[in-house]
Image (cartoon, grey):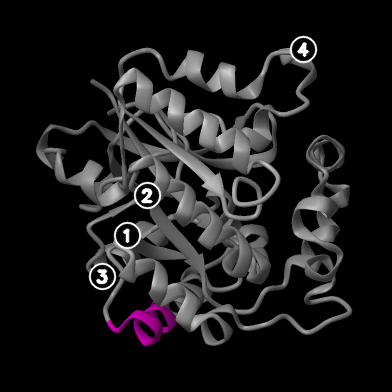
Amino acid sequence: MSTIALKIDVDTYRGTLEGVPRLAAALERCGARATFLFSLGPDHTGRALKRVFRRGFLGKVRRTSVVSHYGVRTLLYGVLLPGPRIGRRCAGELKAIEARGFEVGVHTWDHVKWQDGVARAGAQWTRREFELACEEFGRVFGHAPATHGAAGWQMNAHVPQLQAEHGMRYASDTRGRGPFIPLIEGREVPVPQLPTTLPTLDELIGREDLGDTDPIEHLLRVSADGADHVFTLHAELEGGAYLSGFERLLGAWRERGAILTDLATYASGLNPAALPRCPIEAGSVPGRAGTLAVQGRAR
């Protein structure tokens, strides 16, 4: 019986207010658990429009209808409108998710700033952004975060050590094949990585190489290997226009006998001593623009 750990990235103010409660209700209807990773600082989504010049980004915009998913107002935050402070404005909504029994963790402080800047950032910049998010998490929830999932699967060599310093028990910052202990400049950092192993829905929708293949059927096919997996979804997408498709996916996994759980439960069943030791490298994923942090070959 395979385990599928569900990881929900919450990128925006709108996603926090609208997508998160919809997803929580859908998960409860299915009897599934999941980890919600929150962006906690200002929503500066509008600043992401500069990615229009990045190879592959326009294709994603055309395929996934970015405006309809995020809304015009969200796409103006940080450009023509001030970005609302998510942790400050949505503290009640955030605490309500934990009160319903869901695991909560850190996604980022400023999603766009992290996603566009961390890969080239130095130690001081990285520490400041990371600690801003952790401090706000503590202010909202009253305890330290146990886990972190990097915005846009973007990170650098300083991030795993910061996770260790802050007592995090596991993280899900990468794309890869399965859990591993990260090697940073040849040294082990004792915070297991639980990489996303399945493609996301927005990476599958409208892909020319997949033809008329139903994205849900594709996900069911690639997850039918009997292995454990981590599936990442987004509050703005699966908590919005993709909600019915996500519920169909949950139902099919449940009928198959899969255990639908959160990162904490998944991590609790792992033996860190037995995990492979792997570097974190820059790589690409079909359907997603740019390079991401990916699991390297075991050493």
Is mark 1 in CB contact (under 8 Å) with mark 2? yes
Nearest the eye: 255 or 178: 255
Disc 1 marks which residue?
A: 103
* Mark nearer the N terminus (1 vs 4): 1
Residue 293, horizontal then vertical, whole percent: 51, 43
Q: Is residue 150 magenta?
A: no
Q: Secondary structure at mark 3?
A: helix
Disc 4 marks which residue?
A: 211
Which disc, if any, is residue 19? none
What amino acid is labelled 3 in the image?
A: Glu
What separation in Å lies between label 4 and label 2 (alpha carbons)? 31 Å
Q: Is residue 141 magenta?
A: yes
Segment colored magenta: 134-142
* Mark nearer the N terminus (3 vs 4): 3
What separation in Å lies between label 1 and label 2 (alpha carbons)? 7 Å
Left or right: 109 in relation to 289: left
Please tell me how crowded label 1 is: few (under 14), some (14-19), or many (20+) other residues with Cα within 10 Å: many
Q: Secondary structure at mark 4?
A: loop
Residue in the picture at 67% in, 18% down: 214
What amino acid is labelled 4 in the image?
A: Gly
Residue 89, horizontal then vertical, whole percent: 58, 85
Q: Secondary structure at mark 2?
A: loop
Residue in the picture at 31% in, 43% down: 183
Left or right: 79 in relation to 33: right
Q: Looking at the rendering, which quadrant does residue 86 occupy?
A: bottom right
Is mark 3 in CB contact (under 8 Å) with mark 2? no
Disc 2 marks which residue?
A: 34
